[in-house]
Amino acid sequence: MKEIFLGKPLHWALLVVTFAILWVTGENHLHTSEFNVFAGITFAVGLGVMTVVVLTHRKGERITREPIELTDEELPSGD
């Protein structure tokens, strides 16, 4: 299964939790009745997911199926 589901189990669990939170906001029609609350929840969930992924990533870990190779032209110049 590791070849199908790349990444840490924590990240996959985080995805499921995110879907559940956003499902509940949709079921409660927050996007139409309380848009500011909906926007705040969506922002907080996005920020939380991003923070967890960044903090748990280790340098050199595989992220994609295929390696990302940059040519010399694509590398930042550092200017």
Image (tube, helix red, strand yellow):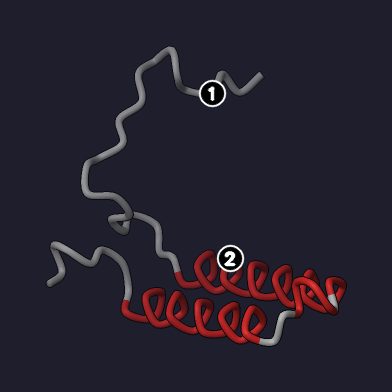
Q: Amino acid at mark 1?
A: Pro
Could you tell me which residue is drawn at 87 percent across and 72 percent down?
A: 36
From this view, report whether residue 17 is shown above or below residue 79.
below
Label 2 SS: helix
Could you tell me which residue is drawn at 85 percent across and 78 percent down?
A: 34
Mark 1 surroundings within 10 Å by alpha-carbon count, few (fewer than 14), some (14 through 19), many (20 or more): few
Q: Using the image as rendered, state which of residue 53 and residue 55 is in the foreground.
A: 53
Residue 6 x, y percent position in the rendering:
25, 63
Report whether 18 appears left or right of 67. right
From this view, report whether residue 13 is shown above or below residue 11.
below
Q: Quarter of the image containing the C terminus?
A: top right
Instruction: Say which of marks 1 and 2 sits in front.
Output: 2
Distance of label 1 from label 2 (alpha carbons) = 24 Å
From this view, report whether residue 62 is shown above or below residue 71.
below
Q: Quadrant of residue 70?
A: top left
Q: Quarter of the image containing the N terminus?
A: bottom left
Could you tell me which residue is drawn at 58 percent across and 65 percent down?
A: 50
Identify residue for label 2.
50
Label 1 SS: loop
Q: Which callout, 1 or 2, points at the residue further toward the start of the chain?
A: 2
Residue 53 x, y percent position in the rendering:
50, 68
Report whether 5 appears left or right of 59. left
Q: Amino acid at mark 2?
A: Met
Identify residue for label 1.
76
Q: Quadrant of residue 61?
A: bottom left
Question: Looking at this rendering, what residue extends furthest in the top direction?
Answer: 73
Residue 45 x, y percent position in the rendering:
65, 75
